Amino acid sequence: MNMRTHSHASCVPDPVRKGSPLLPAPAVVIIVVVLSLTAALAARGQNLETVIATITVGGLMAVELLRRTVAVFSARRV
């Protein structure tokens, strides 16, 4: 062990490096899209239950579509 370092120096987490993103870009895009869709549907006069159901079903369908697309393109061809 290096005797020149302080004993508490190993307890300090690494600082955020300059230029490193704090949030991943895809997550930010998804959040912005969902909030925009929710606001647009609510502004058009739909009730909150319908807005939530629409966003939920759309999200579940998108996840399933992505899973199946990845499965098709990642399958080994014999």
Image (cartoon, rainbow, N blue to C red):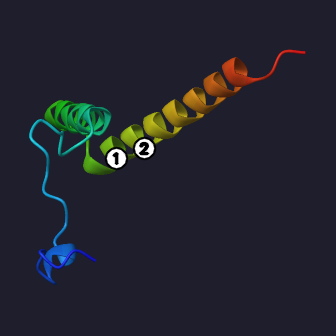
As displayed, is residue 3 above or below residue 16? below
- Dot 1 alpha-carbon crowd within 10 angstroms: few under 14, some 14 to 19, many 20 or more: some
Q: Position of residue 30 (x, y in %)?
A: 30, 35
Residue type at mark 2 is Thr
Residue type at mark 1 is Ile
Q: Position of residue 66 (x, y in %)?
A: 56, 28
- Dot 2 alpha-carbon crowd within 10 angstroms: few under 14, some 14 to 19, many 20 or more: few
Name the residue: 16% across, 72% down: 12
Please indicate whether residue 59 sits to the left or right of residue 72 in the image. left
Whole-Å distance between the Cαs marked 1 and 2?
A: 6 Å
Figure quadrant of the C terminus: top right
Marks 1 and 2 in Cβ contact (< 8 Å): yes
Identify which residue, 14 or 30, lies in the foreground.
14
Residue most extreme to the right: 78
Which element is circle 1 on?
helix
Name the residue: 18% across, 60% down: 14
As displayed, is residue 78 above or below residue 11? above
Residue indicated by mark 2 = 56
Label for residue 8?
Answer: none
**Quarter where residue 18 is shown:** top left
Which element is circle 2 on?
helix
Residue indicated by mark 1 = 52
Q: Position of residue 48 (x, y in %)?
A: 26, 49
**Quarter where residue 69 is shown:** top right
Identify which residue, 41 or 2, lies in the foreground.
2
Q: Position of residue 60 (x, y in %)?
A: 51, 40
